[in-house]
């Protein structure tokens, strides 16, 4: 088994590391202190630099102006960009826009492409993805209530969504809404493109997480649709095909998320080690001299490396054999890497002591923004049960092999 990174990919990763050191990390404290929404000039500067460095749209095909990377190569790059909350935003591969670009690339009509996809690819607008609802379980999207009914040449939407990332300032939302309540569970919903200036579309609030409501891209909104009317040609993809499109969006998205989380883990581990090596507890005695801290460092190193191998194998499987061949692995990486992320961040904060709770380091930002990793895109428990059921099915009595 060859673990060598191809020369072209290695060169790309070197450029990305240099980009992060030179452009992103120096401005990170300012942007995080002021908020992304209040630093448009800085963000625009990062995006200009990313284009110049050949790092723009790594998730897209070359004919869309992207880098045309395999899922495996994109995963490796995503880890590098994940060292800062600004890395993916700088390269226009941030959630939720990256996933929306991918499904628009596949399903958009020529008119939808011109109006929405092309400005999104150029970084001129942002988008959001509205699926989760406050009154239905996010772990079971077949229970969605937000509905869109046909009325002449229009769809009319009524319902509520929340935890809609980046809705504050987005030009449009991709909304998963029930269009055929009587259909089989996974054929009830469709995807609709809804401009955020549509009559009846209301951003109720930015939901406060751990005391931070955020703004702009760094926010999660509650939305309300009240007789919100959009043209029939706002349908994205086939009617009643919303769940299939959602799954196509989530598959590569989980690889992107997991590798980004590993980038966060790497930075947290480096900060933990630097703190342990430099923090004096008494003359000549450092925090790193304590065996429990040494154990945390060693265990974190092992768990990060093991998680990375699992994610990269999953990306390789998808590249070589498709998503169906990697169903178990996609579930495994989602909960496993999220748990590693929580553990490593918690240890890094503990090693920093009270400093780790403050906004004087990036750790508190990562902790408050990424604790949701174990909940969104399917709670850990759902992925564990799904993987276990498939494992058990292969070992039922009477089944060969």
Image: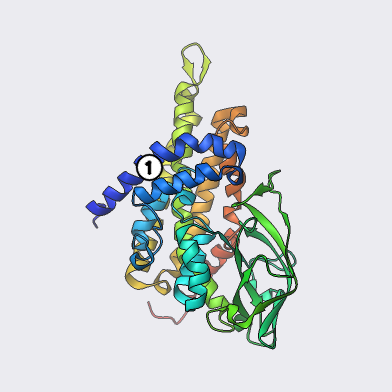
Instruction: Using the image as rendered, state which of residue 240 and residue 394 is in the foreground.
Output: 240
Q: Residue at x 45, y 31 (%)?
A: 273
**Residue at (49% x, 30% y) in the render:** 293
Task: Classify the position of the C terminus by image quarter.
Answer: bottom left
236 left or right of 266? right
x and y, in percent, of residue 186 in the image: 60, 81
**Relative image position of residue 246 (x, y in whole percent):** 54, 72
Q: Quadrant of the N terminus?
A: bottom left
Q: Quadrant of residue 128?
A: bottom right
Front-most of residues 299 and 247: 247
Task: Tell me the colour scheme of the image.
Answer: rainbow
In the figure, 63 relative to 209: above or below?
Answer: below
Q: In the rendered image, which residue does mark 1 sit on?
A: 19
| Residue at left offset 39%, top offset 62% | 314
Q: Is residue 182 above or below residue 257?
A: below
The foreground one among 59 and 195 is 195
Picture coordinates of residue 395, whole percent (x, y): 46, 74
Farthest residue to the right: give it: 226
| Image x and y of residue 44, in percent | 49, 47
Say if 252 sits above or below 278 in the image: below
Tag 1: Cα neighbours inside 10 Å, few (<14), some, or many (≥20)?
Answer: many
């Amino acid at each position: 088994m060859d673990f060598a990174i191809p020369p072209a990919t290695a060169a790309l990763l070197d450029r990305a590391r240099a980009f992060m050191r030179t452009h992103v990390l120096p401005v990170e404290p300012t942007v995080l202190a002021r908020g992304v929404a209040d630093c448009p000039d800085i963000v625009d500067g990062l995006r200009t630099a990313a284009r110049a460095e050949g790092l723009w749209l790594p998730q897209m095909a070359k004919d869309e102006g992207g880098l045309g990377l395999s899922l495996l190569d994109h995963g490796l790059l995503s880890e590098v960009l994940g060292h800062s909350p600004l890395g993916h935003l700088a390269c226009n591969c941030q959630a939720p826009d990256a996933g929306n670009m991918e499904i628009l690339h596949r399903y958009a009509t020529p008119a939808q492409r011109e109006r929405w996809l092309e400005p999104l690819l150029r970084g001129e607008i942002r988008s959001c993805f509205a699926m989760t609802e406050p009154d239905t379980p996010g772990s079971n999207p077949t229970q969605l209530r937000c509905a869109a009914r046909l009325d002449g040449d229009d769809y009319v939407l009524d319902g509520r969504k929340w935890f809609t990332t980046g809705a504050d300032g987005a030009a449009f939302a991709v909304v998963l809404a029930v269009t055929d309540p009587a259909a089989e569970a996974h054929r009830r919903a469709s995807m609709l493109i809804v401009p955020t200036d549509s009559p009846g579309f209301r951003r109720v609030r930015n939901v406060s997480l751990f005391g931070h409501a955020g703004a702009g891209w760094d926010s999660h909104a509650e939305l309300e649709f009240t007789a919100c009317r959009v043209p029939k040609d706002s349908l994205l993809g086939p009617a009643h095909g919303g769940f299939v499109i959602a799954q196509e969006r989530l598959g590569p998205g989980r690889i992107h998320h997991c590798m980004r989380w590993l980038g966060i883990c790497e930075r947290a581990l480096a900060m933990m080690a630097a703190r342990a090596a430099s923090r004096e507890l008494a003359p000549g005695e450092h925090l790193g001299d304590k065996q429990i801290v040494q154990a945390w460092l060693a265990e974190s190193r092992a768990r990060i490396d093991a998680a990375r191998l699992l994610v990269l194998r999953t990306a390789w499987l998808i590249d070589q054999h498709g998503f169906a061949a990697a169903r178990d692995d996609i579930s495994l990486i989602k909960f496993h890497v999220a748990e590693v992320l929580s553990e490593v961040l918690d240890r890094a904060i503990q090693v920093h002591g009270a400093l780790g709770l403050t906004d004087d380091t990036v750790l508190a930002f990562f902790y408050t923004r990424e604790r949701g990793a174990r909940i969104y895109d399917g709670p850990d428990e759902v992925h564990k049960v799904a993987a276990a059921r498939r494992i058990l099915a292969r070992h039922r009595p009477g089944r060969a092999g």
